[in-house]
Amino acid sequence: MVIGLIGSGHIGGTIAKLALGAGHSVVVSNSRGPETLSELVAQLGPGARAATAAEAAAAGDIVVVTIPFGRYREVPVEPLAGKIVIDTNNYYHERDGRFPDIDSGETSDSETLAAHLPTSRVVKAFNSIHYAQLGDQGVPSGTEDRRALPIAGDDADAKKAVTDLIDSFGFDVVDAGPLAEGRRFQRDKPAYGPRFTVETLKDALAQG
């Protein structure tokens, strides 16, 4: 597949490297323009290229949104129509400013992105693991005590595609349910941060 990345910071760069290692190609982008990503593309090697956010969105079979949540309105809408979009974001009011609907519990960060992308299939993933651990803790399927990551989303086929991608990166997956249940592994929740296996992650999600 082609994995498009809107945002190429620590998480984006790590996902790009893992995707290349799993046999995919990647199109990376940021808010400053493709010319600023030449060093990253050189580090990633063959199979990687830089583009604008709109071009990365259009090129990707799966597109990863990995920018600060407060800038979610910058994510291009039309090129992502019908596509699987992985949302790695976390809402940090100290950085993003206050979103009253999120603070009140009326909605969540991923649901807010999904409302911005009404024709996309949004899956929340990768937000609960540090990028360095994402990069070095993956192990083959079937390995004892393999680390598990949570996902949430409203489209079963999209979640299956994201589950397969995460498995290829070296992690088991626990489906937390609809996108609204992504709040169970947001910041400050029991499932956010620590290393879990499938069973211990299920327990942590239940506490959220």
Image (spheres, grey):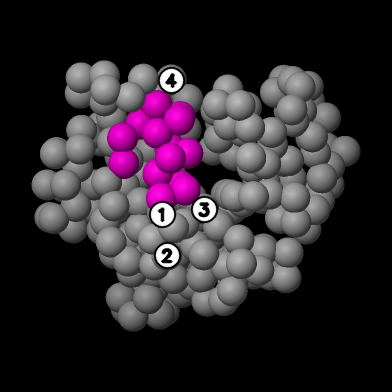
* CA–CA distance in space, label 3 to label 2: 12 Å
Which label's residue is closer to the chain start, 4 or 3?
3
Which label's residue is closer to the chain start, 1 or 3?
3
The residue stretch that appears in magenta = 160-173
Residue at 37 percent across and 76 percent down: it is 107
Residue at 47 percent across and 25 percent down: it is 135
Which label's residue is closer to the chain start, 4 or 2?
4
- Quick check: marks 1 and 2 in contact, CB under 8 Å? yes
Q: Is residue 162 magenta?
A: yes
Give the SS element for disc 3: strand
How many C-alpha atoms fall within 10 Å of the one at disc 3: few (<14), some, or many (≥20)?
Answer: many
User: Relative to the observer, which residue lies in front, 104 or 64?
Assistant: 64
Residue 28 image offset from top left, x and y in percent: 72, 41
* CA–CA distance in space, label 4 to label 1: 23 Å
* Residue 155 disc label: 2
Residue 154 image offset from top left, x and y in percent: 39, 67
Q: Which residue is mark 1?
A: 159
- Quick check: marks 3 and 2 in contact, CB under 8 Å? no
- Quick check: marks 4 and 2 in contact, CB under 8 Å? no
